[in-house]
Image (tube, rainbow, N blue to C red):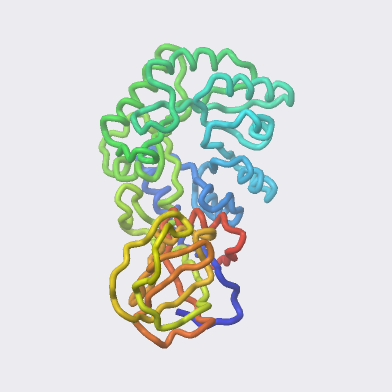
């Protein structure tokens, strides 16, 4: 808890040193395995300061799911290779060709459009074809990949860079020896069919770290796209800390705007809340309840860890309601929270939250 009146709230305090150290450690550990790292910037909204920290830590390229974020980094004079890690929208083809070095793709119509746009401006655009390995988000079915590779290779100004897969995002499918071997085997098969050795076989995201760092045989996997592990130091499969990494690079600060003794049980006829859900109510008698000037519009309250002695009771658009063990919390005090990935993502997106960088 802080009573500093000179700093704006709500604010997200971002420790660049801790992010850099997390990235450096993982990049070095994966390099021993022959795996390069693409640093993912989407959770930071393509923040140039964080992008530059990742590059200084040794990532060989950057990646983002939004072309607007990629453009933000380009406007900050970041010239490193950047991959658009979501299949391009047809309405943004020209921007993708202009600003992204490579894009992940699953649709031949999109690749054709990228080829036509690249020809018009005299540029080459790299393509990584994403393979469906069971998580049921993006991906070409394995039986269709050979035909799409063949047609991609025929397109002018398109450079086929390799294949990739993404797991644990929609359905929580765990990257393991079996599905990573399937990806490796597909790379070997395509190389044999078409007579080349593809540059990139991208195994996935931070959820792959447990497999990658412990596996004695990584096969053809030579790239991972890492974001959450750099930023939060956690394994996305378990949300447990990764040994040696910082888990405190981000702190969300919110200001107390009401502090009163109130009952825990509401009265009157009860209907739906503002967001159509009602938090479970524990009858605790009268408590010290504080209101914070931050809410669902700014972050994911369910993804915030409060300080010891405090409990989040609920939230609305503009408020988070907290029970405090102490009765001495005054108006204007600042309360610090540790955000998870969902809370961080929404907080970075909110224009109402000040971003404060700590070197």
Q: Residue furthest bottom?
A: 328
Q: Nearer the viewer, residue 2 or 276?
A: 276
Q: Residue furthest right?
A: 121
Q: Position of residue 217 (x, y in %)?
A: 28, 34
Q: Quadrant for the C terminus, please.
A: bottom right
111, 194: nearer the viewer: 111
Vertically, is 306 above or below 217?
Answer: below
Image coords of residue 332 (percent x, y): 54, 81
**Horizontal and vertical percent position of residue 87:** 53, 31
Front residue (pair 111, 208): 111
Residue 118 coordinates in the image, percent (x, y): 68, 24
Q: Which quadrant holds the N terminus?
A: bottom left
* Direction from residue 286 to residue 38 in the image, left or right: right
Q: Residue at x 32, y 67 (%)?
A: 281
Q: Nearer the viewer, residue 209 or 9?
A: 9
Q: Name which residue lies at 52% across and 22% down.
A: 107
The quadrant where residue 144 appears: top left
Q: Eyeballing the image, is 234 above or below 114?
A: below
Residue at point 41%, 41% (across, down): 205
Looking at this view, name the residue that lies furthest to the front.
Answer: 269
Q: Is residue 314 above or below residue 207?
A: below
Compared to residue 142, the image places residue 214 above or below, namely below
Image mark count: 0
Identify the residue shown where x is 31% and y is 34%.
218
């Amino acid at each position: 808890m802080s009573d500093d009146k000179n700093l704006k709230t709500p604010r997200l305090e971002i420790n660049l040193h801790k992010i850099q150290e997390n990235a450096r450690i993982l990049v070095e550990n994966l390099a021993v395995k022959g795996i390069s790292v693409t640093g993912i910037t989407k959770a930071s909204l393509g923040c140039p300061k964080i992008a530059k920290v990742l590059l200084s830590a040794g990532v060989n390229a950057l990646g983002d799911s939004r072309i607007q974020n990629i453009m933000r980094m380009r406007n900050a004079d970041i010239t490193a290779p950047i991959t658009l890690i979501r299949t391009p929208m047809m309405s943004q083809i020209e921007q993708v060709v202009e600003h992204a070095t490579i894009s992940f793709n699953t649709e031949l119509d999109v690749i054709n459009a990228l080829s036509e746009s690249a020809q018009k401006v005299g540029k080459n655009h790299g393509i990584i074809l994403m393979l469906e390995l069971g998580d049921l988000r993006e991906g070409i079915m394995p039986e269709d990949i050979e035909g799409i590779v063949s047609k991609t290779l025929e397109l002018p100004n398109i450079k086929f860079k390799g294949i990739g897969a993404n797991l644990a995002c929609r359905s929580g499918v765990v990257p393991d020896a079996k599905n990573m071997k399937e990806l490796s085997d597909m790379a070997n098969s395509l190389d044999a069919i078409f007579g080349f050795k593809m540059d990139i076989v991208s195994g996935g995201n931070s959820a792959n770290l447990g497999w990658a760092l412990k596996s004695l045989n990584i096969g053809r996997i030579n790239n991972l796209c890492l974001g959450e592990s750099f930023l939060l130091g956690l394994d996305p499969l378990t949300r447990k800390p990764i040994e040696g990494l910082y888990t405190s690079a981000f702190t969300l600060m919110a200001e107390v705007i009401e502090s009163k003794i109130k009952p825990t049980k509401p009265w009157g006829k009860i209907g739906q809340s503002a967001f159509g859900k009602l938090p479970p109510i524990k009858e605790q008698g009268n408590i010290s309840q504080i209101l914070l000037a931050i809410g669902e519009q700014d972050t994911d309250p369910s993804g915030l860890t409060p300080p010891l002695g405090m409990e989040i009771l609920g939230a609305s658009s503009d408020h988070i309601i907290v029970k405090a063990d102490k009765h001495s919390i005054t108006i204007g005090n600042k309360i610090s929270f540790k955000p998870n990935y969902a809370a961080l993502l929404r907080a970075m997106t909110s224009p109402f939250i000040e971003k404060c960088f700590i070197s």
